[in-house]
Amino acid sequence: MPIKTFKIDNELELNPGQTGHWWWNHASPEGSVWSANAVPMATGSTTTGFAQTTELEVTRLWRKYIIIEKSTSQFSDTDIETEIHYEVKNLGGTKARFRMYLSVATP
């Protein structure tokens, strides 16, 4: 099964205990299997120091399948949209900066 990985956000932030919700549009192909990972980034500076512990958890990952009917005639005209939604929680005690990566495995 081939696997592709996409960096989908340049930089996201969550405060301690906060959960965020984002999604990826036009997720294809339909029969694929998706996974998500939040990858922490350094948050320090020369004035505050660089010591940190960052804990992030992808708490939910789901697929939203949308069919939009544009015509109700005998020959229906539809648009199909697949979205991958995910929620990330900051489990640590400081603000977390991170990037999101989605991986897709196709049959």
Image (cartoon, grey):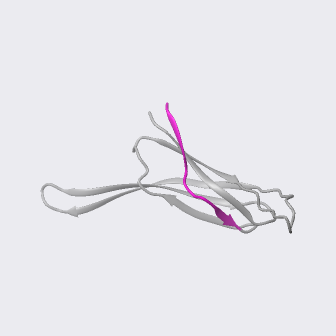
Q: Which residues are magenta?
A: 1-14
- Location of residue 33 with respect to 80 vertically, above or below: above
* Residue 82 drawn in magenta: no
Q: Quadrant of the C terminus?
A: top left
User: Which is nearer the eye, 3 or 50?
Assistant: 50
- In the picture provided, is 56 more to the left or to the right than 27? right
Looking at the image, the residue that sits furthest to the front is 46
Looking at the image, the residue that sits furthest to the left is 74
* Residue 2 drawn in magenta: yes
Residue 84 percent across, percent down from the top left: 49, 54
- Location of residue 20 with respect to 61 vertically, above or below: below
- Location of residue 75 with respect to 104 vertically, above or below: below
Which residue is at 63% across, 61% downward? 11
Residue 102 percent across, percent down from the top left: 56, 48
Which residue is at 52% across, 36% downward? 3
Residue 93 percent across, percent down from the top left: 81, 64
Residue 24 percent across, percent down from the top left: 49, 56
Which residue is at 76% across, 60% downward? 91
Q: Give the number of callouts.
A: 0
- In the picture provided, is 89 more to the left or to the right than 36? right
Which corner quadrant of the image does residue 89 belong to? Answer: bottom right
Which residue is at 60% across, 55% downward? 60
